[in-house]
Image (cartoon, rainbow, N blue to C red):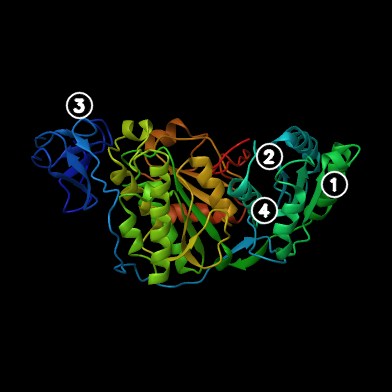
Protein backbone atom coordinates (compact mmCIF):
# COMPACT_ATOMS: atom_id res chain seq x y z
CA UNK A 1 0.00 0.00 0.00
CA UNK A 2 1.47 3.33 -1.08
CA UNK A 3 0.95 5.65 1.84
CA UNK A 4 1.94 8.95 3.37
CA UNK A 5 2.26 10.08 6.98
CA UNK A 6 2.01 13.86 7.25
CA UNK A 7 3.21 14.54 10.79
CA UNK A 8 5.14 12.48 13.32
CA UNK A 9 2.31 13.09 15.84
CA UNK A 10 -0.30 11.48 13.57
CA UNK A 11 -2.03 8.21 14.39
CA UNK A 12 -3.50 7.93 10.88
CA UNK A 13 -1.86 7.83 7.47
CA UNK A 14 -3.28 8.36 3.98
CA UNK A 15 -3.62 5.51 1.49
CA UNK A 16 -2.62 7.05 -1.84
CA UNK A 17 -3.65 4.37 -4.33
CA UNK A 18 -6.34 2.47 -2.45
CA UNK A 19 -6.14 -1.05 -1.14
CA UNK A 20 -8.84 -3.51 -0.10
CA UNK A 21 -11.61 -1.66 1.73
CA UNK A 22 -9.60 1.58 1.93
CA UNK A 23 -10.29 3.88 -1.06
CA UNK A 24 -7.57 6.09 -2.52
CA UNK A 25 -7.08 9.27 -0.54
CA UNK A 26 -8.70 7.87 2.61
CA UNK A 27 -7.16 7.34 6.04
CA UNK A 28 -6.03 4.20 7.81
CA UNK A 29 -4.96 3.70 11.42
CA UNK A 30 -1.22 3.61 12.09
CA UNK A 31 -1.89 1.92 15.42
CA UNK A 32 -4.87 0.81 17.46
CA UNK A 33 -7.18 3.71 18.41
CA UNK A 34 -9.67 3.06 21.21
CA UNK A 35 -13.23 4.36 21.22
CA UNK A 36 -13.24 7.96 22.45
CA UNK A 37 -9.55 8.59 21.69
CA UNK A 38 -8.39 11.41 19.45
CA UNK A 39 -7.77 10.86 15.75
CA UNK A 40 -4.75 12.95 14.74
CA UNK A 41 -3.75 14.17 11.26
CA UNK A 42 -1.54 17.15 10.29
CA UNK A 43 -0.33 16.87 13.90
CA UNK A 44 -3.74 18.16 15.04
CA UNK A 45 -6.94 16.59 16.35
CA UNK A 46 -9.43 15.96 13.55
CA UNK A 47 -12.00 14.01 15.60
CA UNK A 48 -12.71 11.23 18.09
CA UNK A 49 -13.08 7.53 17.42
CA UNK A 50 -16.67 6.32 17.83
CA UNK A 51 -15.53 2.69 17.97
CA UNK A 52 -12.36 0.74 18.59
CA UNK A 53 -10.15 0.93 15.49
CA UNK A 54 -7.49 -1.66 14.73
CA UNK A 55 -4.08 -0.84 13.24
CA UNK A 56 -4.39 -0.74 9.45
CA UNK A 57 -8.19 -0.32 9.56
CA UNK A 58 -10.05 2.21 7.41
CA UNK A 59 -10.72 5.42 9.35
CA UNK A 60 -13.69 7.47 8.15
CA UNK A 61 -17.22 8.61 8.98
CA UNK A 62 -18.30 5.15 10.15
CA UNK A 63 -15.89 5.24 13.10
CA UNK A 64 -14.95 8.92 13.63
CA UNK A 65 -16.92 12.05 14.59
CA UNK A 66 -16.04 15.73 14.87
CA UNK A 67 -14.40 16.99 18.05
CA UNK A 68 -15.21 20.67 17.44
CA UNK A 69 -16.00 22.80 20.48
CA UNK A 70 -18.49 25.49 19.49
CA UNK A 71 -17.56 27.57 22.54
CA UNK A 72 -13.77 27.31 22.38
CA UNK A 73 -11.77 30.18 23.93
CA UNK A 74 -9.20 31.66 21.55
CA UNK A 75 -5.75 32.90 22.47
CA UNK A 76 -3.02 34.76 20.58
CA UNK A 77 0.47 33.33 20.18
CA UNK A 78 2.18 34.79 17.12
CA UNK A 79 3.69 32.11 14.89
CA UNK A 80 4.28 33.06 11.26
CA UNK A 81 7.16 32.37 8.90
CA UNK A 82 9.83 34.95 8.09
CA UNK A 83 9.96 35.23 4.31
CA UNK A 84 13.01 36.13 2.27
CA UNK A 85 12.00 39.23 0.33
CA UNK A 86 12.53 39.50 -3.41
CA UNK A 87 11.61 41.60 -6.43
CA UNK A 88 9.70 40.67 -9.58
CA UNK A 89 7.53 42.24 -12.26
CA UNK A 90 4.69 41.22 -14.54
CA UNK A 91 3.12 42.64 -17.69
CA UNK A 92 -0.24 44.22 -16.97
CA UNK A 93 -2.56 47.03 -17.91
CA UNK A 94 -1.73 50.11 -15.87
CA UNK A 95 -4.70 52.01 -14.49
CA UNK A 96 -4.86 55.70 -13.72
CA UNK A 97 -6.17 54.79 -10.26
CA UNK A 98 -5.66 51.48 -8.48
CA UNK A 99 -3.57 48.43 -9.29
CA UNK A 100 -2.79 47.10 -12.75
CA UNK A 101 -5.13 44.65 -14.44
CA UNK A 102 -4.08 41.31 -15.92
CA UNK A 103 -6.92 41.40 -18.47
CA UNK A 104 -8.36 44.15 -20.69
CA UNK A 105 -12.09 43.53 -20.32
CA UNK A 106 -15.40 45.36 -20.42
CA UNK A 107 -18.10 44.46 -17.88
CA UNK A 108 -21.84 44.93 -18.29
CA UNK A 109 -23.37 44.87 -14.79
CA UNK A 110 -27.14 44.81 -14.14
CA UNK A 111 -28.24 46.59 -10.98
CA UNK A 112 -31.22 44.21 -10.83
CA UNK A 113 -32.07 40.81 -12.27
CA UNK A 114 -35.00 42.31 -14.22
CA UNK A 115 -32.58 43.58 -16.89
CA UNK A 116 -30.52 40.40 -17.24
CA UNK A 117 -31.92 39.75 -20.71
CA UNK A 118 -30.99 43.27 -21.82
CA UNK A 119 -27.43 42.76 -20.60
CA UNK A 120 -27.14 39.34 -22.23
CA UNK A 121 -28.38 40.73 -25.53
CA UNK A 122 -25.81 43.54 -25.29
CA UNK A 123 -23.09 41.01 -24.56
CA UNK A 124 -24.04 38.91 -27.56
CA UNK A 125 -23.98 41.78 -30.06
CA UNK A 126 -20.91 43.36 -28.46
CA UNK A 127 -18.76 40.37 -29.39
CA UNK A 128 -18.21 42.03 -32.75
CA UNK A 129 -16.40 44.78 -30.83
CA UNK A 130 -13.79 42.41 -29.36
CA UNK A 131 -10.67 43.41 -31.25
CA UNK A 132 -7.13 44.60 -30.67
CA UNK A 133 -6.05 43.89 -27.09
CA UNK A 134 -9.59 43.49 -25.71
CA UNK A 135 -9.85 40.16 -23.86
CA UNK A 136 -13.62 40.05 -23.66
CA UNK A 137 -16.93 41.81 -23.06
CA UNK A 138 -18.98 40.09 -20.35
CA UNK A 139 -22.45 40.52 -18.85
CA UNK A 140 -22.29 39.64 -15.14
CA UNK A 141 -25.91 38.70 -14.54
CA UNK A 142 -27.57 37.86 -11.21
CA UNK A 143 -31.08 37.51 -9.78
CA UNK A 144 -31.00 40.19 -7.05
CA UNK A 145 -31.25 43.98 -6.70
CA UNK A 146 -34.91 44.38 -5.76
CA UNK A 147 -37.32 43.30 -3.01
CA UNK A 148 -34.42 43.36 -0.54
CA UNK A 149 -34.15 45.48 2.57
CA UNK A 150 -31.55 46.96 4.91
CA UNK A 151 -28.15 45.29 5.16
CA UNK A 152 -29.07 42.68 2.56
CA UNK A 153 -29.72 45.35 -0.07
CA UNK A 154 -26.57 47.22 0.97
CA UNK A 155 -24.48 44.06 0.52
CA UNK A 156 -25.67 43.62 -3.07
CA UNK A 157 -24.89 47.26 -3.89
CA UNK A 158 -21.51 47.10 -2.17
CA UNK A 159 -20.45 43.95 -3.99
CA UNK A 160 -21.54 45.20 -7.43
CA UNK A 161 -19.56 48.40 -6.89
CA UNK A 162 -16.50 46.42 -5.79
CA UNK A 163 -16.80 44.26 -8.91
CA UNK A 164 -16.79 47.43 -11.03
CA UNK A 165 -13.52 48.48 -9.35
CA UNK A 166 -11.65 45.26 -10.15
CA UNK A 167 -8.37 46.08 -11.93
CA UNK A 168 -9.21 43.74 -14.84
CA UNK A 169 -12.10 46.00 -15.88
CA UNK A 170 -10.98 48.62 -18.38
CA UNK A 171 -14.55 49.86 -18.68
CA UNK A 172 -17.86 49.14 -16.92
CA UNK A 173 -21.44 49.75 -17.97
CA UNK A 174 -24.12 49.63 -15.27
CA UNK A 175 -27.59 48.83 -16.62
CA UNK A 176 -30.58 49.47 -14.36
CA UNK A 177 -34.33 49.21 -14.73
CA UNK A 178 -35.28 52.41 -12.91
CA UNK A 179 -37.63 51.29 -10.12
CA UNK A 180 -35.50 48.79 -8.15
CA UNK A 181 -34.35 48.99 -4.52
CA UNK A 182 -30.74 48.85 -5.68
CA UNK A 183 -31.18 52.05 -7.64
CA UNK A 184 -28.62 53.75 -9.86
CA UNK A 185 -28.35 56.78 -7.57
CA UNK A 186 -27.07 54.55 -4.76
CA UNK A 187 -24.57 52.89 -7.09
CA UNK A 188 -23.25 56.27 -8.25
CA UNK A 189 -23.03 57.59 -4.70
CA UNK A 190 -21.05 54.54 -3.55
CA UNK A 191 -18.60 54.83 -6.44
CA UNK A 192 -18.23 58.62 -6.36
CA UNK A 193 -15.30 58.70 -3.87
CA UNK A 194 -13.22 56.55 -6.25
CA UNK A 195 -13.49 59.18 -9.03
CA UNK A 196 -13.41 56.65 -11.86
CA UNK A 197 -13.97 57.89 -15.42
CA UNK A 198 -14.28 54.40 -16.93
CA UNK A 199 -17.82 53.71 -15.67
CA UNK A 200 -21.13 54.72 -17.28
CA UNK A 201 -24.75 54.17 -16.25
CA UNK A 202 -28.28 54.14 -17.64
CA UNK A 203 -31.78 52.97 -16.66
CA UNK A 204 -33.80 51.12 -19.28
CA UNK A 205 -37.00 52.96 -18.29
CA UNK A 206 -35.31 56.29 -19.01
CA UNK A 207 -34.34 55.68 -22.66
CA UNK A 208 -36.41 54.88 -25.73
CA UNK A 209 -34.26 52.03 -27.05
CA UNK A 210 -32.15 50.46 -24.31
CA UNK A 211 -30.28 48.20 -26.74
CA UNK A 212 -29.20 50.99 -29.06
CA UNK A 213 -28.32 53.19 -26.11
CA UNK A 214 -26.19 50.50 -24.48
CA UNK A 215 -24.43 49.53 -27.72
CA UNK A 216 -23.44 53.14 -28.33
CA UNK A 217 -21.68 53.20 -24.96
CA UNK A 218 -20.01 49.83 -25.54
CA UNK A 219 -18.78 50.93 -28.97
CA UNK A 220 -17.17 53.97 -27.36
CA UNK A 221 -15.56 51.78 -24.69
CA UNK A 222 -14.24 49.28 -27.23
CA UNK A 223 -12.76 51.98 -29.47
CA UNK A 224 -10.54 53.07 -26.55
CA UNK A 225 -9.84 49.65 -25.02
CA UNK A 226 -8.65 48.01 -28.25
CA UNK A 227 -5.49 50.11 -28.21
CA UNK A 228 -4.50 49.47 -24.60
CA UNK A 229 -1.14 47.75 -24.21
CA UNK A 230 0.54 45.80 -21.43
CA UNK A 231 3.36 47.46 -19.53
CA UNK A 232 5.87 46.15 -17.02
CA UNK A 233 4.64 46.68 -13.46
CA UNK A 234 5.88 45.69 -10.03
CA UNK A 235 4.69 42.41 -8.54
CA UNK A 236 3.34 44.38 -5.58
CA UNK A 237 0.35 45.24 -7.80
CA UNK A 238 -0.76 41.59 -7.98
CA UNK A 239 -3.37 40.06 -5.67
CA UNK A 240 -4.26 36.36 -5.87
CA UNK A 241 -7.41 34.75 -4.48
CA UNK A 242 -7.16 31.44 -2.59
CA UNK A 243 -10.07 29.01 -2.88
CA UNK A 244 -10.68 25.27 -2.72
CA UNK A 245 -13.78 23.36 -3.73
CA UNK A 246 -14.72 19.71 -4.07
CA UNK A 247 -11.81 18.80 -1.82
CA UNK A 248 -10.67 15.22 -1.34
CA UNK A 249 -8.13 13.31 0.74
CA UNK A 250 -5.30 14.56 -1.49
CA UNK A 251 -6.19 18.28 -1.28
CA UNK A 252 -4.39 18.88 2.00
CA UNK A 253 -1.38 16.85 0.81
CA UNK A 254 -0.78 18.18 -2.70
CA UNK A 255 -2.76 21.11 -4.15
CA UNK A 256 -3.35 23.24 -1.04
CA UNK A 257 0.24 23.10 0.30
CA UNK A 258 1.49 23.82 -3.21
CA UNK A 259 -0.70 26.92 -3.45
CA UNK A 260 0.58 27.85 0.02
CA UNK A 261 4.08 28.02 -1.45
CA UNK A 262 2.79 30.25 -4.26
CA UNK A 263 1.19 32.48 -1.62
CA UNK A 264 4.50 32.83 0.22
CA UNK A 265 6.38 33.58 -3.02
CA UNK A 266 3.81 36.21 -4.02
CA UNK A 267 3.93 37.88 -0.61
CA UNK A 268 7.74 37.76 -0.51
CA UNK A 269 7.79 39.79 -3.73
CA UNK A 270 5.46 42.42 -2.30
CA UNK A 271 2.18 41.02 -3.62
CA UNK A 272 -1.05 40.17 -1.85
CA UNK A 273 -3.26 37.13 -1.33
CA UNK A 274 -6.74 36.75 0.13
CA UNK A 275 -8.02 33.71 2.03
CA UNK A 276 -11.74 33.25 2.69
CA UNK A 277 -14.23 30.38 3.35
CA UNK A 278 -14.77 31.24 7.01
CA UNK A 279 -16.79 28.08 7.87
CA UNK A 280 -13.93 26.02 6.46
CA UNK A 281 -11.56 27.61 8.95
CA UNK A 282 -13.47 26.08 11.89
CA UNK A 283 -11.14 23.59 13.51
CA UNK A 284 -8.04 25.36 12.15
CA UNK A 285 -8.87 28.93 13.14
CA UNK A 286 -6.39 29.01 16.02
CA UNK A 287 -3.53 28.26 13.62
CA UNK A 288 -4.54 31.25 11.49
CA UNK A 289 -5.08 33.48 14.51
CA UNK A 290 -1.49 32.85 15.54
CA UNK A 291 -0.38 34.21 12.16
CA UNK A 292 -2.09 37.58 12.71
CA UNK A 293 0.60 40.24 12.62
CA UNK A 294 -0.56 41.95 15.82
CA UNK A 295 -3.22 41.86 18.52
CA UNK A 296 -5.51 44.27 16.63
CA UNK A 297 -5.68 41.98 13.59
CA UNK A 298 -6.15 38.97 15.90
CA UNK A 299 -9.17 40.63 17.56
CA UNK A 300 -10.75 41.37 14.16
CA UNK A 301 -10.11 37.81 13.03
CA UNK A 302 -11.56 36.38 16.24
CA UNK A 303 -14.69 38.54 15.86
CA UNK A 304 -15.13 37.33 12.26
CA UNK A 305 -15.01 33.70 13.42
CA UNK A 306 -17.31 34.25 16.41
CA UNK A 307 -19.82 36.23 14.34
CA UNK A 308 -19.97 33.47 11.73
CA UNK A 309 -20.49 30.86 14.43
CA UNK A 310 -23.30 32.98 15.90
CA UNK A 311 -24.85 33.16 12.43
CA UNK A 312 -24.94 29.35 12.30
CA UNK A 313 -26.47 29.19 15.77
CA UNK A 314 -29.20 31.74 14.92
CA UNK A 315 -30.19 29.57 11.97
CA UNK A 316 -30.37 26.49 14.20
CA UNK A 317 -27.40 24.65 12.67
CA UNK A 318 -24.22 23.33 14.34
CA UNK A 319 -20.99 24.95 13.17
CA UNK A 320 -19.72 21.56 12.00
CA UNK A 321 -22.46 21.13 9.34
CA UNK A 322 -19.71 20.16 6.91
CA UNK A 323 -17.99 18.39 5.00
CA UNK A 324 -20.10 17.90 1.87
CA UNK A 325 -21.04 14.47 0.48
CA UNK A 326 -18.36 14.88 -2.20
CA UNK A 327 -15.74 15.70 0.44
CA UNK A 328 -16.61 12.54 2.36
CA UNK A 329 -16.51 10.40 -0.74
CA UNK A 330 -13.05 11.80 -1.44
CA UNK A 331 -11.76 10.83 2.01
CA UNK A 332 -12.44 13.84 4.26
CA UNK A 333 -14.18 12.77 7.47
CA UNK A 334 -14.66 15.84 9.69
CA UNK A 335 -14.69 19.62 9.39
CA UNK A 336 -11.45 19.83 11.36
CA UNK A 337 -9.72 17.64 8.79
CA UNK A 338 -11.15 19.65 5.92
CA UNK A 339 -10.18 22.96 7.54
CA UNK A 340 -6.63 21.92 8.38
CA UNK A 341 -6.10 21.02 4.72
CA UNK A 342 -7.94 24.11 3.49
CA UNK A 343 -5.83 26.67 5.35
CA UNK A 344 -2.64 25.24 3.86
CA UNK A 345 -3.35 27.59 0.94
CA UNK A 346 -2.32 30.55 3.10
CA UNK A 347 1.25 29.26 3.42
CA UNK A 348 3.35 30.42 6.33
CA UNK A 349 2.85 34.15 5.77
CA UNK A 350 1.44 36.39 8.46
CA UNK A 351 -2.12 37.70 8.18
CA UNK A 352 -1.98 41.46 7.81
CA UNK A 353 -5.67 42.39 7.61
CA UNK A 354 -9.24 41.15 8.00
CA UNK A 355 -11.63 42.31 5.27
CA UNK A 356 -15.39 42.65 5.47
CA UNK A 357 -17.54 41.22 2.67
CA UNK A 358 -17.09 43.49 -0.37
CA UNK A 359 -14.19 45.44 1.16
CA UNK A 360 -11.22 46.14 -1.12
CA UNK A 361 -7.77 44.81 -0.29
CA UNK A 362 -5.46 47.64 0.74
CA UNK A 363 -2.38 46.06 2.27
CA UNK A 364 0.37 43.81 0.90
CA UNK A 365 0.47 40.33 2.42
CA UNK A 366 -2.26 37.81 3.27
CA UNK A 367 -5.72 39.12 4.18
CA UNK A 368 -8.59 37.07 5.59
CA UNK A 369 -11.97 37.84 4.00
CA UNK A 370 -15.38 37.41 5.60
CA UNK A 371 -17.35 35.18 3.21
CA UNK A 372 -18.85 31.67 3.23
CA UNK A 373 -17.36 28.52 1.74
CA UNK A 374 -19.75 28.16 -1.21
CA UNK A 375 -17.54 28.02 -4.28
CA UNK A 376 -19.14 30.66 -6.48
CA UNK A 377 -20.06 33.03 -3.63
CA UNK A 378 -16.56 32.85 -2.12
CA UNK A 379 -14.75 33.19 -5.45
CA UNK A 380 -16.92 36.19 -6.36
CA UNK A 381 -16.12 37.76 -3.00
CA UNK A 382 -12.39 37.25 -3.57
CA UNK A 383 -12.49 38.92 -6.98
CA UNK A 384 -14.72 41.72 -5.68
CA UNK A 385 -12.11 42.46 -3.01
CA UNK A 386 -9.56 43.06 -5.76
CA UNK A 387 -8.02 39.72 -6.77
CA UNK A 388 -7.08 39.72 -10.45
CA UNK A 389 -6.94 35.90 -10.49
CA UNK A 390 -8.20 33.07 -8.27
CA UNK A 391 -6.21 29.89 -7.63
CA UNK A 392 -8.84 27.21 -7.16
CA UNK A 393 -7.75 23.81 -5.86
CA UNK A 394 -10.03 20.81 -6.28
CA UNK A 395 -10.03 17.06 -5.80
CA UNK A 396 -13.41 16.46 -7.43
CA UNK A 397 -13.41 18.98 -10.29
CA UNK A 398 -15.68 21.84 -11.31
CA UNK A 399 -16.17 23.81 -14.57
CA UNK A 400 -17.16 27.18 -13.06
CA UNK A 401 -15.27 30.46 -13.20
CA UNK A 402 -15.95 33.70 -11.36
CA UNK A 403 -15.58 37.03 -13.19
CA UNK A 404 -11.76 36.95 -13.10
CA UNK A 405 -9.54 34.14 -14.43
CA UNK A 406 -10.03 31.09 -12.21
CA UNK A 407 -7.13 28.64 -12.39
CA UNK A 408 -8.16 25.06 -11.52
CA UNK A 409 -5.48 23.05 -9.73
CA UNK A 410 -6.16 19.32 -9.37
CA UNK A 411 -5.09 17.51 -6.21
CA UNK A 412 -4.73 14.19 -8.06
CA UNK A 413 -3.62 13.01 -11.49
CA UNK A 414 -6.72 10.93 -12.43
CA UNK A 415 -8.87 14.06 -12.12
CA UNK A 416 -6.43 16.13 -14.18
CA UNK A 417 -6.43 13.47 -16.91
CA UNK A 418 -10.17 12.79 -16.87
CA UNK A 419 -11.27 16.44 -16.82
CA UNK A 420 -8.50 18.03 -18.85
CA UNK A 421 -11.04 20.50 -20.22
CA UNK A 422 -11.45 21.92 -16.70
CA UNK A 423 -8.07 21.50 -15.06
CA UNK A 424 -5.15 23.88 -15.65
CA UNK A 425 -2.52 22.20 -13.46
CA UNK A 426 -1.96 18.80 -11.85
CA UNK A 427 -0.47 19.37 -8.37
CA UNK A 428 0.25 15.71 -7.62
CA UNK A 429 3.99 15.23 -7.20
CA UNK A 430 4.79 18.71 -8.53
CA UNK A 431 6.95 21.45 -7.02
CA UNK A 432 5.97 25.10 -6.81
CA UNK A 433 8.16 26.26 -9.72
CA UNK A 434 5.80 24.73 -12.28
CA UNK A 435 2.68 26.29 -10.79
CA UNK A 436 4.36 29.66 -10.26
CA UNK A 437 5.50 29.66 -13.88
CA UNK A 438 1.94 28.97 -15.06
CA UNK A 439 0.60 31.72 -12.77
CA UNK A 440 3.04 34.24 -14.26
CA UNK A 441 2.06 33.21 -17.79
CA UNK A 442 -1.63 33.65 -16.92
CA UNK A 443 -0.96 37.04 -15.34
CA UNK A 444 1.05 38.17 -18.38
CA UNK A 445 -1.72 37.09 -20.75
CA UNK A 446 0.35 34.28 -22.26
CA UNK A 447 -2.01 31.62 -20.89
CA UNK A 448 -5.79 31.63 -20.63
CA UNK A 449 -7.32 29.48 -17.90
CA UNK A 450 -9.45 26.59 -19.15
CA UNK A 451 -12.69 28.10 -17.81
CA UNK A 452 -11.90 31.70 -18.71
CA UNK A 453 -14.64 32.10 -21.29
CA UNK A 454 -17.21 31.49 -18.53
CA UNK A 455 -17.97 34.43 -16.21
CA UNK A 456 -20.32 34.09 -13.26
CA UNK A 457 -21.08 35.97 -10.06
CA UNK A 458 -23.02 35.04 -6.93
CA UNK A 459 -23.87 36.85 -3.69
CA UNK A 460 -23.90 36.06 -0.01
CA UNK A 461 -27.65 36.49 0.44
CA UNK A 462 -29.02 37.33 3.90
CA UNK A 463 -32.24 38.77 5.24
CA UNK A 464 -35.78 38.97 3.87
CA UNK A 465 -36.83 38.94 0.23
CA UNK A 466 -40.19 40.68 -0.21
Q: Residue at the top extreme? A: 20
Q: Quadrant of the N terminus?
A: top left
Q: Residue at x 75, y 64 (%)?
A: 195
Q: Contact, CB < 8 Å: mark 2 with mark 4?
A: no
**How much space separates mark 1 and mark 2, taking CA atoms?**
29 Å
Q: How many marks?
A: 4
Q: Which residue is mark 3?
A: 21
Task: Give whichever of discs 2 and 4 has the lower sequence position.
Answer: 2
**How much space separates mark 4 and mark 3, taking CA atoms?**
51 Å
Q: Which residue is mark 1?
A: 219
Frontmost residue, 450 versus 433: 450
**Residue 341 position within the rendered picture, expressed as x and y whole percent measured from the top left:** 33, 48
Locate residue 124 relative to residue 351 in the image: left or right: right
Task: Give whichever of discs 1 and 2 has the lower sequence position.
Answer: 2
**How much space separates mark 1 and mark 3, taking CA atoms?**
61 Å
Locate residue 227 relative to residue 294 in the image: left or right: right
Amino acid sequence: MEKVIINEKDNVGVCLNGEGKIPAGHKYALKAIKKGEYVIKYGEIIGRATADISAGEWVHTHNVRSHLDENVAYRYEFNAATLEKGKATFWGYKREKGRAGIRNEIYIIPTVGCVNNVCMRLQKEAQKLVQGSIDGIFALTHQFGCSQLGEDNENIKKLLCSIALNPNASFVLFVGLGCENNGMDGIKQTLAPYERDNIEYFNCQDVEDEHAYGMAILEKFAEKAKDYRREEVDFSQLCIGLKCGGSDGYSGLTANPLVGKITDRTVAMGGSAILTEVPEMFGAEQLLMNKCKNLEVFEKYKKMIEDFKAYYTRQGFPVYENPSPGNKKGGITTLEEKSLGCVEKAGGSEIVAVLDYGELVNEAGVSALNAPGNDLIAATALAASGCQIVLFTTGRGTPFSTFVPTMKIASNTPLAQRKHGWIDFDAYGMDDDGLFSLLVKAVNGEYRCKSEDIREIAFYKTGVTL
